[in-house]
Amino acid sequence: MASLSSFLCRATQCHKTFVKRWLLVQASGQNVASSANFCQSAALAEHSLQTLTSHSECSCHVQWQPRTRHFHSSSRHLSREVEFTDVRYGVRRLAFSTVTKEDLKFLESLLPDRAVTDPDLLEASNVDWLRTVRGRSQLLLRPRNTEEVSQILRYCNDRNLAVNPQGGNTGLVGGSVPVFDEIIISTAQMNSIIDFNPNSGVLICQSGCILENLNGYLEAQDFIMPLDLGAKGSCHIGGNLATNAGGLRLLRYGSLHGTVLGLEAVLADGTVLNCLAPLRKDNTGYDLKQLFIGAEGTLGIITAVSILCPRKPRSVNLALLGCDRFDQILSIFNQCKGMLGEILSAFEFLDQSCREVVQEHLKLANPLQEKPFYILVETSGSNANHDQEKLNQFLEEVMTSGLVAEGTVATEERKIKALWGLREGITEALSHDGYIYKYDISLPLEKIYDIVVDMRERLGDKAKRVVGYGHIGDGNLHLNIVSPAHDHQLLAAIEPYVRRISFITVNPRRRCRSCIKPGWG
Ligand SMILES: O=C(O)CC[C@@H](O)C(=O)O
């Protein structure tokens, strides 16, 4: 294997000469064939929960929906209404070649029936899940294995053709679709499980496997994926790695930088880099795989993954708690870590505005009284009695100390899913609310919500809605701002303000470049 310096050198060179506009990602390419409508698949299920206070003893019914984010089935015709990215942002195409008849002939011979030029199918791959960006690709390739990916990239590199890797196309920041006419390389047909070892818990699979399918496969063997996301019904594991997706279980199982043991990737010139070790401890040489986790496709296309999977917990509980102030959430989190310890598996929060949008667009009712903030605390362990005893003690403590105003607990899978729906439905609900400006920010916990309050004040009624939710356990806030339609002026009021405030919050002693720009004080 090449040394790190020569590898970096090569990777950088590729990036400069070829992958410049690789918008990157494996993120979430859309699975053209599967387009179940999220809302249509929702079913009404009774939601009778063990209650903590008399308030929630009323007949609470929450509409149940699967914890998945699928591509909207209705999106194909709507895709045509999305403004082209290059028009909206005035970006200029660089001097890459365009696909010729000869190129098409070669690529069709390489991938018989898997070089898609049908404009309807392409339309769905040119537009992102949120329908905020749109490319003009005229060719979608669907390789089945690493060798085919390698041949495609070698050819495209020689011909100076730009490419755009695509996984499940569930990404929320426009990284999974082309900007111009890049050739889309989908991982959808690279969806085989290569090996699972129940002794080590190591799963090896191709990068186009859908996260939920992997979890289903593992659950049958008493294991689970260490990663859980709202988009699990469509997102590909390769896209999860490429974007270093965190999700709901990060607090418990850590980030992909820890759980991914190895990967295989194809570099822009077609070279296959095999770092697919299934070893938990591997001290041999440089840990090259780490470079690809979160690289968003800029260094190569991830084609296979080796990942460490935990045992399926025997007992899971989920509590939804309502509280009045954000600082109470932090006190509850501290109590929670101390009292629940090793069984704590998720600690998520949402504000009232999130809850309202979920009710408005997904018709998911609030099982609690209206509160400014809500928390979801999940425990996962191996002994139901032990776990419930710990959880009850914790709940008693936070209720008697007045930190929590009211709450409700679910222990059955169906009810747990219903409660999770309130948190996982936020992204979907917001997508029905208008055009969304999304910021995924990591901040010191004490300050994490200040930016939402600031932004509300700053934007006033220029924004339809400003919401904050996210992963308290990871210090990760989702700041989402909604307007009726894309609005350049509103965007200018949000940025670079949001970057400046985030920078100052994280680095109080350093000067932010955008702080010294005229007009920014
Ligand atoms: O909608 C978002 O901005 C984040 C989506 C996802 O990361 C989540 O945590 O629900």
Image (spheres, helix red, strand yellow):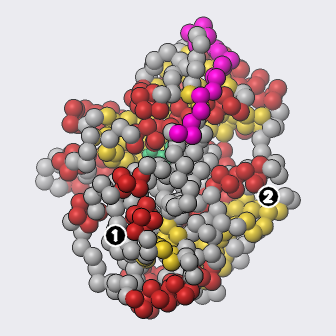
Q: Amino acid at mark 1?
A: Arg
Relative side of 18 to 334, left or right: left
Q: How far across and how far down the image is residue 412, in percent?
A: 73, 29
Q: CA distance from mark 2 to mark 1?
A: 42 Å
Q: Amino acid at mark 2?
A: Gly
Report the residue at 77% width, 62% height from top.
Answer: 202
Q: How far across and how far down the image is residue 353, in percent?
A: 39, 29
Which segment is the magenta one?
Answer: 40-57
Instruction: Let me know if residue 449 appears in the view.
Output: no
Instruction: Let me know if residue 476 appears in the view.
Output: yes
Label 2 sits on residue: 201
Relative side of 62 to 388, left or right: left
Q: Nearer the viewer, mark 2 or mark 1?
A: 1
Furthest residue in direction left, as rendered: 518
Report the residue at 78% width, 34% height from top.
Answer: 315
Label 1 sits on residue: 136
